[in-house]
Amino acid sequence: MAAVTPAALALVLGAAVFHALWNAAAKGARGSSYVFVWLNSVGSAACCLPLALVQLGRAGWPWSWSLLVGPVVSGLLHIVYSLVLQTGYRRAELGVVYPVARGVGPLLTMLVALLALGERPGLAGLVGAVVVLAGILVVATGNQITHRDRLVRGLAYGIATGVAIACYTLWDNHAVVTWGLEPLTYFTFTITTQAILLTPGAVRRRAHWQVTLQTSWPRSAVVAVFSPLAYVLVLIAMQTTPVSLVAPVRESSIVIGSMLAWWLYREPNPVRRLAGAVVVLLGIGLIAVG
């Protein structure tokens, strides 16, 4: 199997930085989690639509059934991911939910790629998967015994989010690789679909609009810009690099996210979190060269 190229590695690592930043911003959101996710989706769609329309116009307005079906399925998967993640951030620590989600997601992606897609990461990649799991355990079990309930919630939401990550990653990889859809256009239609599907629920929660906007609009703006930027970079990398390598390498964001959890939200045990994050990175490195 081909290794990650320098260009793809730069794209994925850049995406990891943006990803950690928007997750740190999302953790501090107040008001309704649902309304916050809806605002993020609307903001991202507003940012991306003009660029995607220009790109489509230059390409002669190509249309296909895959360009319609692909974003709808992806939008539904991203809605599940976003709502589970935001709820997890509300009920548990960033330093638990984030690394567990970002570790479980690529592990499941790699497993499906190995068993169903015929990708072969090699022995180093398989060992790396085990090392990633070990690092996640180090990070996630760093709480005091008095925080056991929040730890259990964090693990549960992290795992559920990781499953959603694996689902949308595999689907989106199929869309941009097998179907050959252009990443920016594909993501724009996905996030637009997501915003449309979330709107009826947001209208029913309009009583929460004012408090969510007043307390969280700067955080929503950060998510609206950095989230699409991070994921479009990943989609571009997927076009030239196997998903079993892209998925774990992008989780280098775990290191940044773990330290932001300590710095911004004063979550405990920064040394343990950093040690676990480094172990995860070691596993990611093994996967990347495997």
Image (tube, helix red, strand yellow):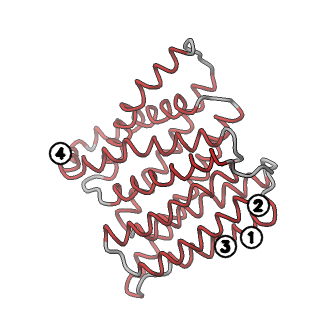
| Residue 257 image label | none
Cα separation between marks 2 and 3: 13 Å
Q: Is residue 83 above or below residue 104?
A: above
In this picture, residue 33 sits left or right of residue 149: left
Q: Is residue 167 above or below residue 90?
A: above
| Residue 131 image label | 3
In this picture, residue 83 sits left or right of residue 219: right
Residue at image coords 23%, 41%? 206
Residue at image coords 51%, 58%? 161
Give whichever of discs 1 and 4 has the lower sequence position.
1
The x, y position of residue 182, in whole percent, is: 59, 29
Q: Are marks 1 and 2 in contact (CB under 8 Å)?
A: yes
Q: Is residue 138 above or below residue 214?
A: below
Q: Is residue 70 above or below residue 235?
A: above
Residue sitting at the far front:
6
Q: Which residue is mark 2?
A: 290
In this picture, residue 35 sits left or right of residue 96: left
Q: Amino acid at mark 2?
A: Gly
Q: Are marks 3 and 4 in contact (CB under 8 Å)?
A: no
Give whichever of discs 3 and 4 has the lower sequence position.
3
Callout in the foreground (2, 4): 2
Q: Quadrant of residue 149?
A: bottom left
Callout in the foreground (1, 2): 2
Q: Are marks 2 and 4 in contact (CB under 8 Å)?
A: no
Residue at image coords 58%, 46%? 168
Cα separation between marks 2 and 4: 50 Å
Q: Are marks 2 and 3 in contact (CB under 8 Å)?
A: no
